[in-house]
Image (cartoon, helix red, strand yellow):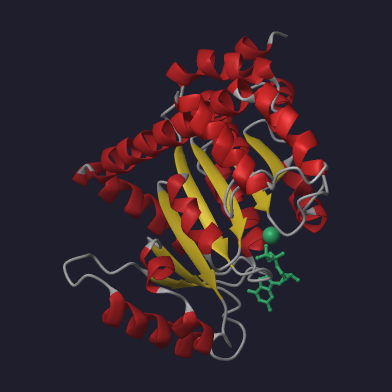
Amino acid sequence: MDIVPGILKGDKRSIARLITLIENQADEARDLLKQLYKFTGNAITLGITGPPGAGKSSIVNFLAKKFRENNKKVGVIAIDPTSPFSGGALLGDRIRMQDLTLDDGIYIRSMGSRGALGGLSRASYDAVKVLDAAGMDYIIIETVGVGQSEVDIIKLADIVALVLIPGMGDEVQAIKAGVMEIADIFVVNKSDMDGADRLITEIQMNLDLNQDKNKVKPPILKTVGTTGEGIADLYKTIIDVQKQLQDSGMLTNKRKTRINQELQELIREIHLKQIISSFETQIRIFTEKALNKEIDPYSAAVYILENAKL
Ligand SMILES: Nc1nc2c(ncn2[C@@H]2O[C@H](COP(=O)(O)OP(=O)(O)O)[C@@H](O)[C@H]2O)c(=O)[nH]1
Ligand SMILES: [Mg+2]
């Protein structure tokens, strides 16, 4: 099957082929993405983020099943910046998700975060577009880390759920306001363990201190990733938040911001490539010179740029 019609039909092999082309930065991928763009924009993207081991994959597994029970098609992208060189970054996750892979209404893919400047790679953005064009109603993106890469998820997700676990009360205080602010939903997972209620209090205090008073307080939910307890509530909350975002026009705003940022990033990327290729000869010459200690790289770069202006 041709890739584009295949993807539009939701064919898993076509989806997989294009995502691989995207990961390999094949020129063909860019052309195919151009053709698919007008078929995107229907999926709701849901970011599930939080520290390693918090139970994100466990929650995603239950949540994906919930979406299926409600006849929603769901795509899952697991991004693991901690194992950028391993193709099967999340082996454990794959095993747990195995029972889902026979179902045509679900597509699961793990991706590395390689190529990103401290955040999500361009490839993950494009993979989301592929799943969107393939007719997924929801796309769940699992990302690791409490830090900059976590804030990055907002560039990809319409709705962000931050997963935290008991015993990290002090860490909640240490989490920068910026990270707390990206969360539309707080999930206190491992609530079978001691300290879940204390963590909820800590989150509330943090929100009271840092959050804009006029903003709606994000809901805080308890889950158990091993049993699925609380997932039904989480599902319902996601649907509620989605409705709020749609009704208030916030969803359109978020998407507008996202396209604006993507355009800026692309201009930067394309422009940079053009600059570098236009200096190809000089770069080659000055590499030799620097190698022979005739000039230092910094002076060489300045020299090349100054001469280009003439
Ligand atoms: N006790 C307990 N363990 C959990 C819970 N949720 C997940 N786990 C376990 O925590 C570990 C990490 O879970 P995983 O979903 O891979 O976390 P991730 O790194 O955030 O994706 C696994 O051994 C899970 O079985 C929970 O609610 N309670
Ligand atoms: Mg995981």
Q: Quadrant of the C terminus?
A: top left
Task: Give the image location of residue 225, x and y in percent.
Answer: 63, 68
Return the residue nearer the eye: 287 or 256.
Answer: 287
Q: Quadrant of the N terminus?
A: top right
Task: Give the image location of residue 226, x and y in percent.
Answer: 68, 69
Q: Is residue 109 visible?
A: yes
Task: Give the image location of residue 295, x and y in percent.
Answer: 70, 44
- The quadrant of the rendered image in which ligand 2 is seen is bottom right
Residue at horizontal 58%, vertical 32%?
304
* Label total for image: 0
Return the residue nearer the eye: 63 or 186.
Answer: 186
Return the residue nearer the eye: 72 or 57.
Answer: 57
Residue at horizontal 79%, vertical 51%?
89
Task: Give the image location of residue 281, x and y in percent.
Answer: 69, 22
Vertically, is 280 above or below 52?
above
The image quarter containing residue 166 is: bottom right
